[in-house]
Every structure is written in structure tokens, then in C-alpha cells.
Amino acid sequence: PETGCLSIIVLGASGDLAKKKTFPALFHLYRQGFLQPDEVHIFGYARTKISDDELRNRLRGYLINEKGASPDQSEILSSFLQLVKYVSGSYDSEEGFRLLDKEISEHEISKNSQEGSSRRLFYLALPPSVYPSVCRMIKQCCMNKSDLGGWTRIVVEKPFGRDLDTAEELSTQIGELFDEPQIYRIDHYLGKELVQNLLVLRFANRFFLPLWNRDNIDNVQIVFREDFGTEGRGGYFDQYGIIRDIIQNHLLQVFYLVAMEKPVSIKPEHIRDEKVKVLQSVLPIKDEEVVLGQYEGYKDDPTVPDDSNTPTFATIVLRIHNERWEGVPFILKAGKALNSRKAEIRVQFKDVPGDIFKCKKQGRNEFVIRLQPSEAIYMKLTVKQPGLDMSTAQSELDLSYRQRYQGVTIPEAYERLILDTIRGDQQHFVRRDELKAAWEIFTPLLHRIDDGESKPLPYQPGGRGPAEADELLAKAGYVQTLGYIWIPPTL
Ligand code: BG6
């Protein structure tokens, strides 16, 4: 691994994302020894005028209350916070960025007495509207000092644009300043343990290889449910809606990994090439294969306009025009304010031909990957009901992580992804052409919603979403197994 001075600059340091995700992830990396105190310096940058200590105190207040915090953590936390400095300035003037550069350089010089390196990681925890100006400022004022070696990388968060045109414009603006290997577009779903496992499951197991196609699989569901609404962030959410917030990025990334062909190798570019290919085979979304919803009460949020047409729920069927998947619906479903919180992939197999068990059809084989909570992989299958009778029942082969990997801590998505940016591994980041292909699929539908042509149906908070969505599922071929519930094992 590379050594020498590493500066991590969190732009938007006083915002929500920095507080909730970026700084905690940095702290966890530090605690685990991935950020060495003699190499690393962290800079917070934002407009608010506060001192180093004020930022440290704010962060302390937040990090100390984190889950899993223990008394001995307070010492580690203090030593971590000593690495954090703060610089204030605007996002579009050179003054602040010159000051930032000066601070970074000073630390590079003081730390580099033995060994030269100028590694600079800029994390843009900012709204995308300021990405172009911030990137310009970084380019003009804050690039790594080439005589010291090292690199400059920038990390950006979704939403990358609102539709195909705005996303392309943003990509062009950033692309004029930085090369693709310097740009890390984060989609935190790619940092989740079971999302990362998909590649291994699919391509390292003889079980799945011959079954993973239209001959055996009837339909695939990729589901995201939250049991809370948009409380506190209605203003942001209303401009984007569930498709831009969850489906076009998080669920689509999962979709790629389920549907793509085997990459030539596990090199990041080979994997990303396959993702783009499968996306290019996706057919235009049909109106009759979309159900939109908006939960009742969503518009009570004072930051949401009374006439908002923004969906908080959507079920969308994607169809792939290729040899493996022709005719198999991929049902992407996401909703806020539903009856549970979970994210899972559910692969439903076709019925067994020539069924000799005269029992009433009990259910189909399913392969389920539970991304969260309680990470698990399980196969729902038919077995003989134990006992004297020759009857059948639904059961499961269950790999529940908490039980199987006791004592193993599953890293947070952001932790893992930030470490990748330091190591220069782009496998779990979104490439420019991937992003473009993703927007191509959803833009026509998004425009119909923006124009008010497609309207969300009202649904009760705390329920399953609009009944029409279940009807669409059934029409697409999904057969629900009644009376079978998978119960995660308790320890
Ligand atoms: C974010 C969305 O990207 O992902 C949020 O903006 C959503 O609306 C969140 O709540 C879900 O992430 P996770 O990791 O909790 O599933």
C-alpha cells in the first residue's frame, strides 16, 4: 500500500451527510487502524465561520452517541479529533480554496520530512448544484503537489443530475476538470456486504450457473421498503422523488449485478463493462408496467408543496432484451412509509413440470438475498413434512449472517467505500457511461411524472403501498406463497 501524507478534505463539513455518514466512517476507519495518525490529516471545509475546536466539539457530540460507543472510545475519539482541522470559505471563490491549499500544504511539508507524498482526497458532501464550481476551485487552487507525487481524487454523491441531459451536463463539466480515474461517484448500496457478495454468489457457485436464466427463473424482485416517511427532508425529497432517490441508483445497481453476464475478470473495468452492457439491453419502460404512489400525509410536511406530484412509492417492471432474460420481468419496487424496513432480492423460479405431489400447489422455489436488516441468504424450497404422512411443506436452507458469522462485524457501506477511494479501487463506484445508461432508462418516465401526466396513487402510511402494485406483481407472474414466512433465527 501507498504511504506518506494523506489529506482527506470533507467539503460541506457542517452538513447532514458529513455528520451522519462521512465523519463517522472516517472515525471507524481510524479506530480500526486504516488511517495512520502520522500520515493522515482531515480538513473540514464549509461556509460557516467556526473554529477547529467548534467543529471537533460538534463531531464529538455526534460520534460519542453512536451505536456501539464505549467509554474507552472517548480517548480514541479525542485522538481522532486532533487530526481534524477546519477551514471556512465559500464554494465559488478562490480565497477560501487558496487558504485550504495552504493548510494542506503545510501539513504535507511538516509530515513529509522523511518521505514525499501528496495524496488529496476531496469528499463533496454538498448539493450537486455546487459540484462544478467546487471542482473548478479544487483544480485551480488545491491539486496535489506534483513534486511530492501522490494524487488528487474527488468523491461525489448522488443525485448526479435530474435527468439524462442535466446528468450529462454535470458529467461534462466535471469531466473537463478531472479524468475518470480521479472521479469516485458513490452509490452506497455498492458498499453493502451482500451487494458485494452477489458477484461471488453468482459466478463462484456451480449451483446457480445453469439455473440463472429464462428457462428456470420466472421473475425477479428487487425491493426496498422503509417504515418511515420523508420527515425532515421533505424539501430535498420532493425535488427528486423515489425513482431518483432509490430506484435509478441503488436498486438499479443491484439489478445490474443480478442480471449481467460474467465479466472477463474481477478487474473493476471488466465488471463495469458488463454492467453497461446489460443496461443497454433494457427495453423502454411501459406505462402499464408502472405503479406510482404517494403516502397520505406526505404533503402535510411544510417543506412539500400542496400540489406535489412526487411519488414516494414506485413499482416498475424492467425487461431485458437478451438471450438470458427475454420474457423475465425484473420488478423494482421502492417505497417510503410502508409496513416494514427491508431491502431484498427475491428470485422466483418456475413451477416444477409434471408435479407428482398431488397436494395443492404450496409455493415456488425462491432464492432470497436479504440485504438488510439481518443480512441473510436463504432458499425457500419444498420438503417432506416430517412425520408419518407423505405430505409436503415449505421450508428453507438458511444462511443467516448473524448466526453463521458470529462475532464478525460487517463494515458500514461508507467505511468500505472511503477506504476504496484511498486505495484507488473504482470497482464499487459508478462509471460515467453507467450513469448515462441509467438515466436513459428512467428519463422518459420521470418527464411524464414531472409534467403531471403520470400521477401517483394515494396509499395509507404503514401499509403495503397501493393495491395496484400487488396487482402488477401478480400480472408480471409473481406468485405469493401464502402462509410461509421466513423467520430470521435468533441467537
Ligand atoms: C439514501 C436515500 O440514498 O438511501 C434515502 O437518499 C434512503 O432516502 C437511504 O433512506 C437508504 O439507505 P439505507 O442504507 O438505510 O438502506
Image (tube, grey):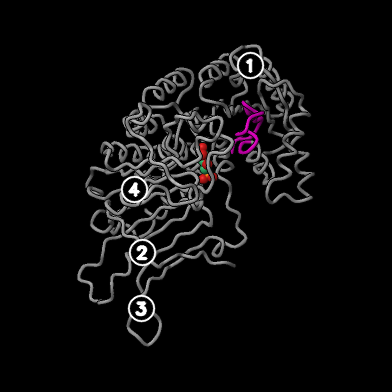
Residue kind at label 3, given as amino acid type: Lys
For label 3, count other residues whose C-alpha is less than 10 Å away and answer few (under 14), some (14-19) or many (20+).
few
Element under label 3? strand
Residue kind at label 1, given as amino acid type: Ser
In three-dimensional space, the C-alpha distance between marks 1 and 3, rounded to whole angstroms, equals 68 Å
Is residue 10 within the magenta segment? Answer: yes
Residue kind at label 4, given as amino acid type: Glu
Q: 98 above or below 387?
A: above
Rendering coords of residue 53 (x, y %):
78, 29
In three-dimensional space, the C-alpha distance between marks 2 and 4, rounded to whole angstroms, equals 19 Å
Point out which mark residue 481 bears. 2
Q: Is residue 283 or residue 119 the one in the foreground?
A: 283
Is disc 1's CB within 8 Å of ligand 1? no
Mark sitting earlier along the chain (2/3) = 3
Mark sitting earlier along the chain (3/4) = 3
Point out which mark residue 90 bears. 1
